Structures are given as C-alpha cells and as structure tokens.
Amino acid sequence: MPTDCIPFRDTNYFSELICDYLDENQALQPFYNHFPKLENFKTQITEKEASVTTHTRAVLVEVLQKQYQNVNASTLTLANIESLGEGQTFTITTGHQLNLFTGPLYFLYKIISTINLTNELKAKHPEYNFVPVYWMATEDHDFDEIDYFNFKGKKVKWTRDASGGVGELDTNGLDQVFESYSNQLGHGKNAEFLRDLFKKAYLEHENLAEATRYLANALFKDYGLVIIDANTPDLKRLLIPYIERELLEKVSYNAVEKTNAELSKISEAYKIQVNPREINLFYLTKGLRERIIEKNGSYYVNDTEIKWSKSELLKHLHENPERFSPNVIMRPLYQEVILPNLCYIGGGGELAYWFELKAYFETVNVPFPMLLLRNSVLVKTEKQTQKIEKLELSLKDLFLKQEVLINQQVKALSNIDIDFTSQKEHLQNQFKNLYQLAEVTDKSFLGAVAAQEKKQLKGLSNLEKRLLKAQKRNLNGHIDRITEIQDQLFPGQSLQERNLNFSELYLEFGDQLIHQLVLNLQALKGEFLILNL
C-alpha cells in the first residue's frame, strides 16, 4: 500500500521533550540508556543478560502458562512463553490500560510496533529469541479513563460503579453495551466479526482482565504476542526486596525528585509528567486500591482504618505480596524486574515519565531499558487521497490547526493580496522618522508617537482580518471541502489514532487493517506514517 511519512516535530502534536529525544539532543542523554537503534541492541542484551536469573525466568514461565490454560493461544505464542525460560530469550514490551474494546486506535500501533521490532531484532541477531509482550494494566484503578470507546463520533460507554484494580471488575452490564454497539454496526462480514469479538470477549468472561486478554489474543495471536497480567502473588514475590527498600528508604522519591529538578533546568518546555510520592505504592484488595503512607514510624492505608507498625507491615508484605501495588513510578521497575526486557515501547506521555526514572533504576541496580516511541499512523482511503490532491493540500498542511489551515489556503487562493506585512513594515519605517524627529525636538512627544504607531498598526491588522473574512465568504465552498476532509482525518481536531476505535476502520477494511499495519509499520523509523488503505 502507498505510504508517506512526516517528521514527528512537523506534526505539531508531540512535545518538545519527545522531539528533542528523537533528535538525540545531547542534553537528554543522561536520562536514558541506549538510544533505540538496531546497532545498540547488542549492548542492551549483554547488560540485561547479566541481571536475569534462572529462577526469575522459571517463575515467569510458570505464571504465564497458568494464565494461558484456558486461552486459545497460537503455537507461536505458546512457543514464545516456553522460550522465556531460556537464557537467550528477551522481550520487547508495551503496556496499556484495559480500555473497553481496546479504546483508541493507537492500542493496535503499540502492539504492532512491539511485534515488528522483535522480528527485526531476530533478523539481526538470529542467535537470540525476541518475544513481543503486552503488559495489561490490571492494577490501574482509573475506571473513568477506560469505560468507553468512540464509534462514529459517539461514545459507547459502560456505566457502572467501580473501585479497586480494574482487572478484577466483573463484566456485569456489558450485555447492555453490546446491544447498543451491535445495533450501530450494521450488516456484513466485518460487522459480524466485530459483533462476535465483542460478545465472546466481554459476555463470556468473568472479569475485565480475562476479557482483555481474550480480545488482544484474538487480534494478535498469529504474531506470537504474549499477554501478561502481573497482578499475581508469584510475580509480586520477586519484587519484595524492592518494595522493602521503597517502604523503608523512600528510594524512588529521592531519586526521581532529583531527576525532575535536573530535567526542568534543561528547558522550560519540558513538563514534568509525574511527581513522586514519598512511598510510591498502593495497597490493593478487592474493591480497594489506595495509597500507603507513613507517619511517625507507622504505616497507613490512606482514607481507611488499616494500620501497621514497621515490623507488621514487612511481615504482611512477605505473606501477601500481591496486596502491594506499584504506582506509575514503580510499575516500570516491576516490569524490568520480572521480564528479561530490552525495550519499552510507549507513547509520548509514557516516555516522558520513563525519562524521570533512570537514576532510580541505577540506585536499585536494575538495567534501564531502551525507550522507543511507538509508531503513529494516519490511515486514509483512496477516495480521501484523491480529495486531498484535488484540494492541493500537502501532508504538512493536513496537520495544521484548522483555523491556521483555512487562513493559509484562503490567502493562497485569493486573487488579491491579503497579507499586509509590507504595509505594516512601510508604516513602521515612517514612524522611525517620527521617533528621530521627536528625539531632537521634544522628547515628550515619544509617547504620543508610540501610541499613534500602535493605533495605526492595529488598524491595519483589523483591515487585514476583515478582508480575510470577506474572502472566506467568497471561497466558502472550497473552505467547506477542506474542513470536511480534515474533520474526517482529524476527528475532534485531534490525531485520528487518539480518537477512533479500531472497529470503525475494521468495518471498512476488515482483515486487511491489521495485515497492512504489520506490513508497513517500521518500529525504528522514527517518523509519523501516513498509510493509504
């Protein structure tokens, strides 16, 4: 399929921090390990190889095999799980919330970036095995962020009360969501596939974690994807030494606070993504995920009556490690402790908080993974491509804010000059003479000259705006066509991938959607992909 690319910086949708990272800005080098280039992975392999124990691998394989007992997994996925017990196998990982029916379209791009990178690494290093892993955020408690997806400009929403880790939420009420969604799908082979997929995932599984695992496996099992739910006692037990240090020494807080201060010094444009707490752990039980806090040597679960002394808390940790849930600061560490992982693939916001963590990883002596920005894609049809060409819009034009785009196009298409820049420059030159005259005659007139200059420049700007508005009326049909095509490709004046659900594109393209994405996404390319389907 025809494709094109645009630099991430030119889209104007990515932060200065991420754009500087992609440009390998020297100032950011202290905040990551190895830049994600194919030739750098051998060094990362060597570092990770030395830190992963046989015991950790054995526990990981055993947990995954249990989690896959009732899953219709592919031979490739099962082989990948088995190979994780071997010293020459490493993972490439992405993570995502348990959004209803995958949530935004970029869920697919994260996983496909991960799959494609493992294949690229296998071709480069055939002596090793590389396994794509999707880390389900089952311990997350932000239900309001995941309880809907967008479909044809409307929200398909799951309304219910929810508390605690979302992975354990039962699927009650999703039968009503299914009925509403099913009625909007229409008919045809692709609609039936989506209807069946939703039904089997959410109406035939008891909780959200199981439903999401079914869904991701159904979409990606042929590519060997391994899906992990890390909310298990056996895996949490591997984290106990790090949890102890967190509770007693506040290691992450001290390291991340220092890093955030250093990041802020580099550029005012670098916004701190997350601020650490003194203890970056939650207490997790059925229906509860709440912060652990320390006061005067005692430990509490925030807004509850639960309380321990230091010795009681450590005893509880060793007996019930599954009750201790890492927050956004500690979750990346948990991932790197239990997985033989080389690289984390995430969005711009995710990478921004990973940059805060390198010093913390060094403090606890865990290798820091490579950080890779996930692929971003704009999918357009042949019909949309023809409209864009007819309107003589460039790829860069499409990414402009709509008002900017329309003004630019009106000025370009008008048979009169709407740009008053030359007139303003001429006026300013005239006022330079007046300033000089005031300097040598009466300096008290300087203020009056400045006020008059400001007034006349403002008048020219107002005339320019009125002329532009008049030309917009004259070119109304053309403007409508520009607005229509941009609204289709950038729904809600946002990136398509952050708004649309995959099912909207699947209705049109069917199996070709994922197939073509796998064929065309290049994990290490470092540019925004425009894909014609």
Image (cartoon, rainbow, N blue to C red):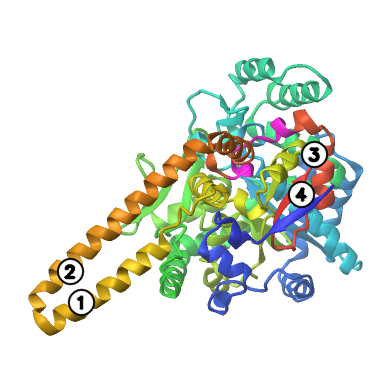
Whether residues under marks 4 and 2 lie with C-beta atoms below 8 angstroms apart, the answer is no
The CA distance from mark 2 to mark 3 is 64 Å
Disc on res. 449: 2
The CA distance from mark 2 to mark 1 is 7 Å
* Label 2 packing within 10 angstroms: few (<14), some (14-19), many (20+): some
Which of the two residues, 268 or 197, is positioned nearer the viewer here?
268
Residue 102 vertical placement versus 418 (above, below): above
| Residue holding disc 1 | 435
Q: Which residues are magenta?
A: 495-505
Q: Is residue 228 visible?
A: no
Amino acid at dot 1: Tyr
Of circles 3 and 4, the one toward us is: 3
Residue depicted at x 71% and y 31%: 503
Label 2 or label 3, whichever comes before in sequence order = 2
Which quadrant: the C terminus?
Answer: top right
Q: Quadrant of residue 510?
A: top right
Whether residues under marks 1 and 3 lie with C-beta atoms below 8 angstroms apart, the answer is no
| Residue holding disc 3 | 513
